[in-house]
Amino acid sequence: MSKIPLSPVSIADIARRAGVAESTVSRALNNNPVINEQTREKIQALAREMNYKLNTGARNLRLQRSHAISVIINAETHDGQKFSDPFMMDMIGAIADELHQHNYSLLFSSPAITSNDWHSHLLGSKRSDGIIVIGTGRDDAPLQKLHAMGDALVVWGAAKPDTQYCVVGSNNYQGGQIAAQHLLQRGCKRLVFLGDIAHPEINQRFQGYFDVLKAAGLATQERHVQAAFSIESGFNHVTELLQGDLDFDGIFAASDNIAMGAINALQQQGYKVPEDVSVVGFDDIPIAPFFNPPLTTIRQNIHAGGKLLVEKILQQINGDEPVRSQMLPTELVVRSS
């Protein structure tokens, strides 16, 4: 005689055992921060003990949600930023780890999708519940459009005075100030900035750096080169600068990739770093401590940033509370460049 299969354990069963409301169980199983940590752990342990299995298909159908978040790198081809960029991989990893904690999946979307298609392709089709965009981009009109449509949207980048959508990012202006102060303290007097200020994040880094030089009476010695985010761009631009006599003794690069390319160009031309030219990067990517020489840089707290991006997108999806933009502090990491 075959056994009658046991009915699957439900949220209601767990709620009765735990002596709490079903909504409390649901939130605890989804790691909702509204439920305190002790209660969450107790309910999750009880669910494991009772062999509770989440029916994600039924839940998503009931909630009209996909339980996936789209992540888009908002950069054009000539910007030099790709998925394989160490900064991008670090950021996407931080986002994926945090989404996993909330039982959400990451849907990586190619930046080749045109801006006008983001809503219909990702949200209108129910492929994802919200969009995290990495990079404000040269023109944020597509982001403003998504916000105006009421889409759940959080952007990693730099907020402008008229920005309406939620932005999480680093204090880029502060980072630029710190980099300039460090170079001046090293005795540098003739400085070069490598970075494309058409991007709001890079523009803020440049402004912080330039204001420090201006206060020191060295603004006229500053030289600005519109480098893309790649190692190749840093290498090629510095090689061009070195075609004549060396007339700079410090470089502030808008990214670590640019800084590493710049250092390679200097070394190939026989110059020593930092004896002849001091170099400061921005990001503190994982390879920075192991470069030759180990790279002095401005650190962004990528893992805290990824956590905030996820928290704020889920707050919008759940309608828990209004979300506000938030900037994270930057810090100087002194190594040997």
Image: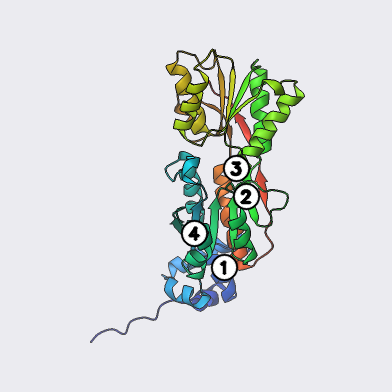
What kind of residue is marked 2? Val
Which element type, helix, strand or loop, lies under badge 4?
Answer: strand
- Cα distance between the residues tagged 1 and 2: 25 Å
What kind of residue is marked 3? His
Whether tag 3 and tag 1 are in contact, CB under 8 A, the answer is no
Foreground tag (1 vs 4) = 4
- Cα distance between the residues tagged 4 and 3: 22 Å
Q: Position of residue 119 (x, y in %)?
A: 53, 65
Q: Which of marks 4 and 3 is nearer the N terminus?
A: 4
Crowd around label 3: few <14 · some 14–19 · many ≥20 (10 Å): some
Q: Is residue 211 visible?
A: yes
Foreground tag (4 vs 3) = 3
- Cα distance between the residues tagged 1 and 4: 22 Å
Residue picked out by circle 2: 168
Q: Which of marks 3 and 1 is nearer the N terminus?
A: 1
Whether tag 1 and tag 4 are in contact, CB under 8 A, the answer is no
- Cα distance between the residues tagged 3 and 2: 15 Å
Q: Where is residue 189 in the image (x, y as percent from the top left)?
A: 66, 16
Whether tag 4 and tag 2 are in contact, CB under 8 A, the answer is no
Residue 27: give its label.
Answer: 1
